[in-house]
Image (spheres, grey):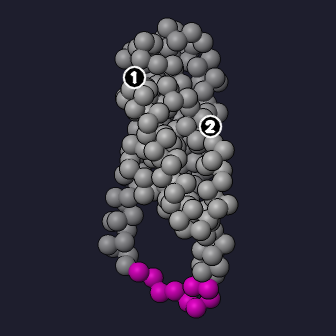
Amino acid sequence: MNADDLPRIAHDTAVFEAFYREHVEAVQRFVVRRVDDPHLAADLTAEVFLAAVDAAGSYRSDRGAPAAWLFGIARIVVASESRRSARERHAVRRIEGRRLLETDDIARMQDRIDAAARARSLFAAVSRLPDGERAVLELVALDDLSVADVAVVLGIRPVTARVRLHRARATLRRQLSDEGSPTLAQPMEAAP
Protein backbone atom coordinates (compact mmCIF):
# COMPACT_ATOMS: atom_id res chain seq x y z
CA MET A 1 0.00 0.00 0.00
CA ASN A 2 1.28 3.45 -0.90
CA ALA A 3 1.79 5.76 2.12
CA ASP A 4 -0.12 8.51 0.33
CA ASP A 5 -3.17 6.20 0.24
CA LEU A 6 -3.27 5.81 4.02
CA PRO A 7 -5.85 8.57 4.67
CA ARG A 8 -8.25 6.58 2.46
CA ILE A 9 -8.53 3.80 5.09
CA ALA A 10 -11.20 5.91 6.78
CA HIS A 11 -13.64 5.61 3.88
CA ASP A 12 -12.40 2.96 1.42
CA THR A 13 -12.89 -0.59 2.71
CA ALA A 14 -10.53 -2.12 0.15
CA VAL A 15 -7.72 0.23 1.18
CA PHE A 16 -8.44 -0.45 4.85
CA GLU A 17 -8.40 -4.21 4.28
CA ALA A 18 -5.02 -3.99 2.52
CA PHE A 19 -3.64 -1.79 5.31
CA TYR A 20 -5.01 -4.12 7.98
CA ARG A 21 -3.60 -7.28 6.36
CA GLU A 22 -0.20 -5.63 5.93
CA HIS A 23 0.11 -4.51 9.57
CA VAL A 24 -2.07 -6.71 11.80
CA GLU A 25 0.68 -9.23 12.65
CA ALA A 26 3.12 -6.51 13.71
CA VAL A 27 0.49 -4.76 15.81
CA GLN A 28 -0.49 -8.04 17.47
CA ARG A 29 3.17 -8.77 18.31
CA PHE A 30 3.49 -5.29 19.79
CA VAL A 31 0.37 -5.72 21.92
CA VAL A 32 0.95 -9.27 23.17
CA ARG A 33 4.38 -8.31 24.50
CA ARG A 34 2.66 -5.78 26.71
CA VAL A 35 -0.46 -7.63 27.90
CA ASP A 36 -0.88 -11.18 29.13
CA ASP A 37 -4.54 -11.82 28.31
CA PRO A 38 -5.23 -13.04 24.75
CA HIS A 39 -8.74 -11.59 24.74
CA LEU A 40 -7.45 -8.20 25.86
CA ALA A 41 -4.69 -8.40 23.24
CA ALA A 42 -7.29 -9.02 20.52
CA ASP A 43 -9.45 -6.15 21.81
CA LEU A 44 -6.50 -3.76 21.94
CA THR A 45 -5.36 -4.77 18.44
CA ALA A 46 -8.84 -3.95 17.14
CA GLU A 47 -8.81 -0.70 19.10
CA VAL A 48 -5.51 0.28 17.47
CA PHE A 49 -7.01 -0.11 14.01
CA LEU A 50 -10.17 1.77 14.99
CA ALA A 51 -8.02 4.60 16.30
CA ALA A 52 -6.01 4.49 13.06
CA VAL A 53 -9.20 4.87 11.03
CA ASP A 54 -10.24 7.84 13.19
CA ALA A 55 -6.79 9.44 12.84
CA ALA A 56 -6.22 8.58 9.16
CA GLY A 57 -6.96 12.12 8.04
CA SER A 58 -4.11 13.46 10.17
CA TYR A 59 -1.47 11.09 8.72
CA ARG A 60 1.39 12.90 7.00
CA SER A 61 3.72 10.78 4.85
CA ASP A 62 6.57 13.30 5.28
CA ARG A 63 6.74 12.44 9.02
CA GLY A 64 7.40 8.72 8.61
CA ALA A 65 6.27 5.35 7.37
CA PRO A 66 2.72 4.11 7.98
CA ALA A 67 4.08 1.34 10.25
CA ALA A 68 5.80 3.85 12.52
CA TRP A 69 2.63 5.96 12.65
CA LEU A 70 0.63 2.85 13.52
CA PHE A 71 3.10 1.84 16.27
CA GLY A 72 2.68 5.32 17.73
CA ILE A 73 -1.07 4.76 17.89
CA ALA A 74 -0.57 1.28 19.36
CA ARG A 75 1.71 2.69 22.04
CA ILE A 76 -0.97 5.20 23.06
CA VAL A 77 -3.74 2.57 23.08
CA VAL A 78 -1.70 0.14 25.20
CA ALA A 79 -0.63 2.90 27.62
CA SER A 80 -4.25 3.98 28.03
CA GLU A 81 -5.26 0.41 28.81
CA SER A 82 -2.42 0.08 31.28
CA ARG A 83 -3.56 3.21 33.13
CA ARG A 84 -7.18 2.01 33.12
CA SER A 85 -6.15 -1.40 34.41
CA ALA A 86 -4.01 0.13 37.18
CA ARG A 87 -6.96 2.25 38.33
CA GLU A 88 -9.18 -0.83 38.34
CA ARG A 89 -6.64 -2.90 40.32
CA HIS A 90 -6.28 -0.09 42.84
CA ALA A 91 -10.06 0.10 43.29
CA VAL A 92 -10.34 -3.67 43.70
CA ARG A 93 -7.54 -3.71 46.31
CA ARG A 94 -9.29 -1.01 48.28
CA ILE A 95 -12.55 -2.95 48.27
CA GLU A 96 -11.24 -6.48 48.59
CA GLY A 97 -8.20 -6.22 50.85
CA ARG A 98 -5.59 -8.96 51.00
CA ARG A 99 -6.64 -12.57 50.84
CA LEU A 100 -4.89 -14.98 53.17
CA LEU A 101 -2.38 -17.33 51.59
CA GLU A 102 -1.81 -20.93 52.59
CA THR A 103 1.72 -22.27 53.15
CA ASP A 104 1.51 -24.33 49.94
CA ASP A 105 0.49 -21.24 47.98
CA ILE A 106 3.52 -19.35 49.22
CA ALA A 107 5.86 -22.24 48.39
CA ARG A 108 4.47 -22.49 44.84
CA MET A 109 4.85 -18.76 44.34
CA GLN A 110 8.43 -18.89 45.62
CA ASP A 111 9.22 -21.70 43.16
CA ARG A 112 7.81 -19.64 40.30
CA ILE A 113 9.73 -16.56 41.38
CA ASP A 114 12.99 -18.52 41.58
CA ALA A 115 12.41 -20.10 38.18
CA ALA A 116 12.18 -16.66 36.54
CA ALA A 117 15.15 -15.01 38.32
CA ARG A 118 17.16 -14.15 35.20
CA ALA A 119 14.15 -12.72 33.38
CA ARG A 120 13.28 -10.62 36.44
CA SER A 121 16.83 -9.33 36.55
CA LEU A 122 16.62 -8.23 32.92
CA PHE A 123 13.15 -6.71 33.34
CA ALA A 124 14.33 -4.87 36.46
CA ALA A 125 17.36 -3.51 34.63
CA VAL A 126 15.15 -2.35 31.76
CA SER A 127 12.67 -0.76 34.17
CA ARG A 128 15.47 1.28 35.75
CA LEU A 129 16.25 2.90 32.43
CA PRO A 130 14.95 6.43 31.94
CA ASP A 131 11.60 6.43 30.13
CA GLY A 132 13.02 7.78 26.86
CA GLU A 133 15.83 5.22 26.70
CA ARG A 134 13.50 2.36 27.65
CA ALA A 135 10.97 3.36 24.97
CA VAL A 136 13.66 3.45 22.26
CA LEU A 137 15.15 0.11 23.38
CA GLU A 138 11.75 -1.62 23.44
CA LEU A 139 10.74 -0.33 20.02
CA VAL A 140 14.08 -1.37 18.46
CA ALA A 141 14.70 -4.65 20.30
CA LEU A 142 11.15 -5.95 20.73
CA ASP A 143 9.17 -4.33 17.93
CA ASP A 144 11.96 -4.49 15.33
CA LEU A 145 11.60 -0.87 14.26
CA SER A 146 14.48 1.03 12.73
CA VAL A 147 15.98 3.88 14.69
CA ALA A 148 14.48 6.29 12.15
CA ASP A 149 11.00 4.83 12.67
CA VAL A 150 11.46 4.92 16.44
CA ALA A 151 12.25 8.62 16.16
CA VAL A 152 8.96 9.16 14.31
CA VAL A 153 6.95 7.11 16.83
CA LEU A 154 8.42 9.02 19.78
CA GLY A 155 8.47 12.42 18.07
CA ILE A 156 12.23 12.89 18.47
CA ARG A 157 15.15 13.40 16.11
CA PRO A 158 16.87 10.27 14.74
CA VAL A 159 20.18 11.25 16.32
CA THR A 160 18.43 11.53 19.70
CA ALA A 161 16.97 8.06 19.21
CA ARG A 162 20.43 6.64 18.36
CA VAL A 163 21.97 8.25 21.43
CA ARG A 164 19.19 6.93 23.69
CA LEU A 165 19.58 3.43 22.25
CA HIS A 166 23.34 3.51 22.79
CA ARG A 167 22.91 4.71 26.37
CA ALA A 168 20.24 2.10 27.12
CA ARG A 169 22.41 -0.75 25.84
CA ALA A 170 25.48 0.48 27.71
CA THR A 171 23.50 0.89 30.94
CA LEU A 172 21.99 -2.59 30.65
CA ARG A 173 25.38 -4.18 29.96
CA ARG A 174 26.82 -2.45 33.01
CA GLN A 175 23.88 -3.28 35.31
CA LEU A 176 23.72 -6.92 34.27
CA SER A 177 27.45 -7.47 34.58
CA ASP A 178 27.42 -5.75 38.01
CA GLU A 179 24.72 -8.18 39.10
CA GLY A 180 26.91 -11.10 38.02
CA SER A 181 24.57 -12.12 35.23
CA PRO A 182 26.86 -12.57 32.18
CA THR A 183 24.32 -14.77 30.42
CA LEU A 184 21.97 -11.80 30.26
CA ALA A 185 24.65 -9.27 29.37
CA GLN A 186 25.92 -11.25 26.36
CA PRO A 187 22.81 -10.87 24.15
CA MET A 188 23.00 -7.10 24.62
CA GLU A 189 26.53 -7.16 23.16
CA ALA A 190 25.29 -8.90 20.03
CA ALA A 191 22.19 -6.77 19.51
CA PRO A 192 22.24 -4.55 16.39
Q: Earlier in the sequence, mark 2 or mark 1?
A: 1
Amino acid on which the number 2 mark rests in the picture: Pro
Residue 86 lies left or right of residue 107; in this view the side is left
What residue sits 54% from the left and 25% below the top? 67
Return the x and y of residue 183 as percentages of the image width and height. 67, 60
What residue sits 55% from the left and 61% below the top? 176
Residue 19 lies left or right of residue 158; in this view the side is right
Evaluate if marks 2 and 1 touch, with contact meaning CB atoms under 8 Å apart: no
Return the x and y of residue 129 as percentages of the image width and height. 42, 52
Does the rendering let one see residue 139?
A: yes
Magenta range is: 98-107
Q: How many marks?
A: 2
What residue sits 44% from the left and 36% below the top? 163
Does the rendering let one see residue 39?
A: no
| Up/down of 79 relative to 107, above or below | above
Between the C-alphas of marks 2 and 1, the distance is: 32 Å
Q: Nearer the viewer, residue 162 or 3?
A: 162
Per the image, label 2 sits on a secondary structure element best described as loop
Sort mark 2 into few (<14), some (14-19) or many (20+) by Cα contacts within 10 Å: few
| Up/down of 102 relative to 168, above or below | below
Amino acid on which the number 1 mark rests in the picture: Ala
| Residue at the spot of label 2 | 192
- Give the position of the N terminus as an image quadrant: top right
User: Is residue 40 located in the magenta-colored stretch of the structure?
Assistant: no
Q: Nearer the viewer, residue 124 or 180?
A: 180
Q: Nearer the viewer, residue 8 or 116?
A: 116
Which numbered disc covers residue 55? 1
Sort mark 1 into few (<14), some (14-19) or many (20+) by Cα contacts within 10 Å: some
Q: Residue furthest bottom?
A: 103
Which numbered disc covers residue 18? none
